[in-house]
Amino acid sequence: MKSKEQLALRTYNQVHIPRKYEKGKRRISVYISWSYPGESNRNPAELDNRFSTMTEVKKVLWPDYEWADLSSFLQGISGSLELFFVAWVYFQEFCGEVSGYPVPVYQRIDQAGYKLPIDERILEDTDTLFIFGLDHMITDQEASAGEIEAIENFLKREGTCLVIGPHHDVGISDDLKLRQMEYLHHGDALVPRQQRFGKYTRSILNGLGIPVENKYGLRPAVVKGTNKVAPFTPNRDLDTKGWLKGVTSFNFHMHLPHYEITKNDGSINLLATQPIDLSNPHPFTEAGNTEFNSFIWIKPDGKRAGDVLIADSTIFSTLFGADESLENFWRNISTL
């Protein structure tokens, strides 16, 4: 990965220039489902359902972020949101090099309050659309009927791909003891006892008739004696398109969602499950589960000519590093 000094020139507040279609190349776009003001303006005195402030990040992860001082980096919750953008830069650059096109990142509501629903302005020059479900449910982001229709029409185009990544849903229970069990299981002091994400991505999945729901925040197992995530359990016989070619693991994150398939008519292919760290109990493991659903492929059908993939947004971030296996996964999605 490049240092900040090696990154390409950065611009802000620019109007997107549409990319022309070229056979054999994919135009990739990223859509962040949050309201930046809605997230950054959350009251830090509220313990649940918000991102951390930079003060909390610095305290928990000291001294890693001592460079983020008052003169050089946003503080409060907004600083934590900017850390996501920093962690996505390598993914953007990597996919841009592979695809031959720059990779724009859109926000549902950006720092300046500019509102951008998913419509033809985004979709007309996009072949692969990533939707990162990082909106707290409390901010009430939900796809409109027009957005659902626009995505349905997008997926009618041959060769399109929707990659949708609802994040975790921690602390759904009213039982405070269960919330504490979840907290001790994942072990991330920056995650509150209740942190529910993904109303927007859930509304997209419901609107498309895809019966998958993000649940929990589960800590993946690691390779013994290391901090490297354990290999996932692949279902390669179902992976007829090769999404996981050369891929044995994703990256480590302390709290990953389980993608529960609530109904399967045969179109939903579970391509990978992730072993869980069983060091500390969790309601999901107490029920007898040792792995969670981490990667799903919904094939084209009579209504859709495009593919739909479901994978957590943190797989496309370098907050916890990137290796050859993860890069192979990014390359597959950028080229298939």
Image: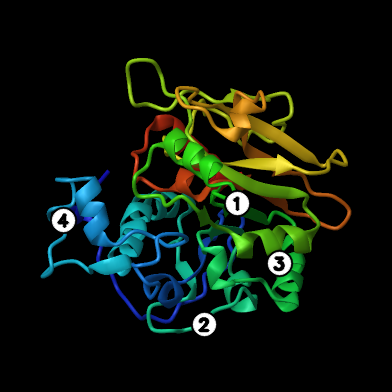
Q: In the rendered structure, are the residues bearing label 2 and label 3 in contact, judged by CB atoms less than 8 Å apart? A: no
Residue drawn at 46 percent across, 84 percent down: 114
Q: Where is residue 157, by image quadrant? A: bottom right
Residue 305 x/y as whole percent: 79, 55
Mark 3 closeness class: few <14, some 14–19, many ≥20 residues within 10 Å = some
Please state which of the two labelled residues, at mark 1 or mark 4, is closer to the viewer.
1
Please state which of the two labelled residues, at mark 2 or mark 3, is closer to the viewer.
2
- The first of marks 1 and 2 along the sequence is 2
Which quadrant is home to the C terminus?
A: top right
Please state which of the two labelled residues, at mark 1 or mark 3, is closer to the viewer.
1
Q: Mark 1 points at which residue?
A: 174
Q: Is residue 21 visible?
A: yes
Q: What amino acid is at disc 3?
A: Ile
| Residue in front for this viewpoint, 164 or 206 | 206
Q: Mark 3 points at which residue?
A: 151
Cα distance between the residues tagged 1 and 3: 35 Å
Q: Where is residue 130, by image quadrant? A: bottom right
- The first of marks 1 and 3 along the sequence is 3
Q: Name the residue under label 4.
A: 5
